[in-house]
Amino acid sequence: MPATNNAREREIRPSVVFRKVTGGFRSDWGAQIHAGYRSVTGTAALHGQTALQSISQLLAGTFTPTPST
């Protein structure tokens, strides 16, 4: 077990920067879409896939996220 939570903080950093640069989300729907996109592409990156591959799998119904531990 690592002594810090630095890896998790680095994982959410792109979303924080996006929110600050764009001035925040205008709706709950937009925030949910962005969170879903980051979740799907982040999971894919951990498995060595590109964002395009993961979104294509999601639209085709073949994307299977791994359960969190």
Image (cartoon, rainbow, N blue to C red):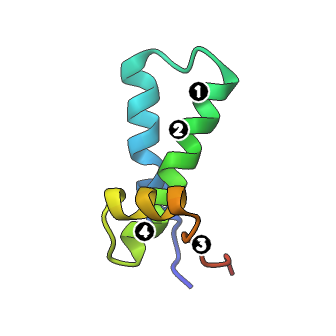
Q: Amino acid at mark 2?
A: His
Q: CA distance from mark 2 to mark 4?
A: 15 Å
Q: For residue 41, which numbered disc appears in the image?
A: none
Residues marked 2 and 3 touching at CB (< 8 Å): no
Within the image, what quadrant is residue 51 found in? Answer: bottom left
Of pointers 2 and 4, the one earlier in the residue sequence = 2
From the viewer's side, name the closer residue of 50 and 5.
50
Q: Is residue 24 left or right of residue 51?
A: right
Question: How many residues crowd around disc 3 within 10 Å: few (fewer than 14), some, or many (20 or more)?
Answer: few
Q: CA distance from mark 2 to mark 1?
A: 6 Å
From the viewer's side, name the closer residue of 63 and 8.
63
Instruction: Name the residue carrying label 4.
Output: 44
Within the image, what quadrant is residue 67 found in? Answer: bottom right
Does 35 sit above or below residue 62? Answer: above
Q: CA distance from mark 2 to mark 3?
A: 17 Å
| Residue at horizontal 58 percent and vertical 14 percent from the top | 26
Residues marked 4 and 1 touching at CB (< 8 Å): no
Q: CA distance from mark 3 to mark 1?
A: 22 Å
Instruction: Name the residue carrying label 1.
Output: 30
User: Residue at the front extreme?
Assistant: 60
Does 31 sit above or below residue 54? Answer: above
Q: Amino acid at mark 3?
A: Pro
Of pointers 4 and 3, the one earlier in the residue sequence = 4
Of pointers 3 and 1, the one earlier in the residue sequence = 1
Q: Secondary structure at mark 2?
A: helix
Q: Secondary structure at mark 1?
A: helix
From the viewer's side, name the closer residue of 15 and 52.
52
